[in-house]
Image: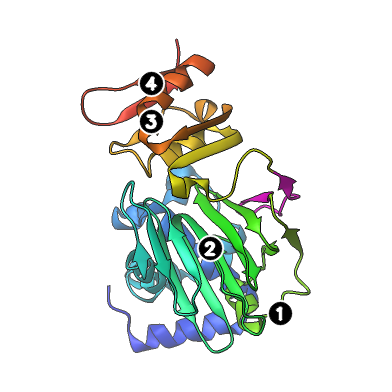
Amino acid sequence: GDVTRETREKFEAWLHGNRAHKIAYREFEQVYRDLDFVAVEAGVDLDEELGRRKAGWLSLVPDWLRKPAFAGGAALAAAAAAATPDYQTQVAEIRELTLEDGSVVTLGAKSRIDTKFTPTRRQVTLFEGEAFFEVAKDPSRPFFVAAQDTLVRVVGTKFDVKRSADIVHVSVLEGVVEVMKPGDIEEAIAKADTSNIDKQVLTAGERVSAARRVALPQARQVEQIKPGSWRMGRLAYEDASLAEIVADLNRYYDRPIRIASSDVGDLRSTVAFQTSEIDQVFEVMEAIHPVRVDRPTSGEVGVRRKR
C-alpha cells in the first residue's frame, strides 16, 4: 500500500521519540522478514487465532504502524533493500569479492550481503548464508559485520561469519575479533565506540555461536575445524546439530532437504565431508543416527526418525 505524508511524519516522530521504539520497530520489521509477510497478506491475526495477548515489544507499536497498508510501504523499506543486496550467490556458488577498501570477502553458497563504506567506518550486513573476511588493516576506520542482532568489530584480520537459522557463528582464523549484541546496532556502528558494550573477544582458533535474543555465550576453542575451510569445498562440524548441518547442505545441494521434526534436528554430530559428496552424507546420517533419509527420484529430500 501507499504511505501518506501524514503517516510517514507520524512514523518518524514515533520512531525517534523513544529509544525503546527503535528497538520495538526493528523487532517488528524482523517478524515481517521471517514470516515472508504471509500472515499479513492472508489477512490473518496470529494473536487472535492463537488466543494470545499482545505483549512485549509489540505493545509499544501503535495500531496505525501494525496495519498491512503501512507495512507495504515504509515498514518494508529495509526488507526491500534486503531483497536486492549488493552481492549474492546461488546454490553451490562460491564467489570472491574485493571491496572498495581492499578487503576481500569470499561469499559462500546461497548467501547475501550489503556493504556500506564512509570516511569513518566500514560496514557489511550478512542477510543469509556465510562469508569469510580478510579485512584490510585501517585502525582509523573500524570494520563491522552485522548479522541478526549480533555485531562483529575488527580493525584488520581474517574471520568467518555464518548465519544459520536463529544463530550467528563467528570463528577466527587470524587476529582479534570482537563479538557483541548491542541494543541498537546502527547506533553502535555510528558511534564506532564499543568500549561500554559487553562482548566476547576472540583470537585465532576460537568460535562463538550467538543465538538470537540470547546473551552471548563464552568463546570456545575449535581445534579440528579451520575457519573458512568451506572455501575449498570442505564442510566440517564439531558437535553440531543436524538442523545446522542440513541448513548448510541446502546451500550446496540442488534439491531442498527438509527435517521432519525438531527432535531430529536436535541430534548432534561431529563430521566432515566435501560438498561434492552430499549423497554420501545421507548414508552417514542413517548410519550414526536413528533417522531415515527419503530420497525420491525428484523433489524434496526428507529426514525423519526411524519407526
N-term mark: 2 or 4: 2
Mark 1 sits on what residue? Answer: 193
Q: Residue furthest front?
A: 232
C-alpha span from label 3 to label 2? 26 Å
N-term mark: 1 or 4: 1
Is residue 210 inside the magenta stretch? Answer: yes
- Please tell me how crowded label 4 is: few (under 14), some (14-19), or many (20+) other residues with Cα within 10 Å: some
On the image, the x and y values in percent for residue 61 come to 53, 69
- Please tell me how crowded label 3 is: few (under 14), some (14-19), or many (20+) other residues with Cα within 10 Å: few
Q: Residue at x 38, y 21 (%)?
A: 293
Q: Residue furthest top?
A: 307
N-term mark: 3 or 1: 1
Query: Of the residues shown, which amino acid type is indicated by label 3?
Result: Glu
Res 73 → quadrant: bottom left
Secondary structure type for disc 4 = strand
N-term mark: 4 or 3: 3
Secondary structure type for disc 2 = strand
Is residue 72 inside the magenta stretch? Answer: no
- Magenta span covers which residues? 206-221
Give the side of residue 230 with respect to residue 84, left or right. Answer: right
Secondary structure type for disc 3 = helix
Query: Of the residues shown, which amino acid type is indicated by label 4?
Result: Val
Mark 3 sits on what residue? Answer: 277
Camera-nearest residue between 230 and 50: 230
Closest to the camera, between mark 4 and mark 3, is: 3
Closest to the camera, between mark 3 and mark 1, is: 3
Q: Residue at x 57, y 82 (%)?
A: 121
Tell me the number on the disc at residue 133.
Answer: 2
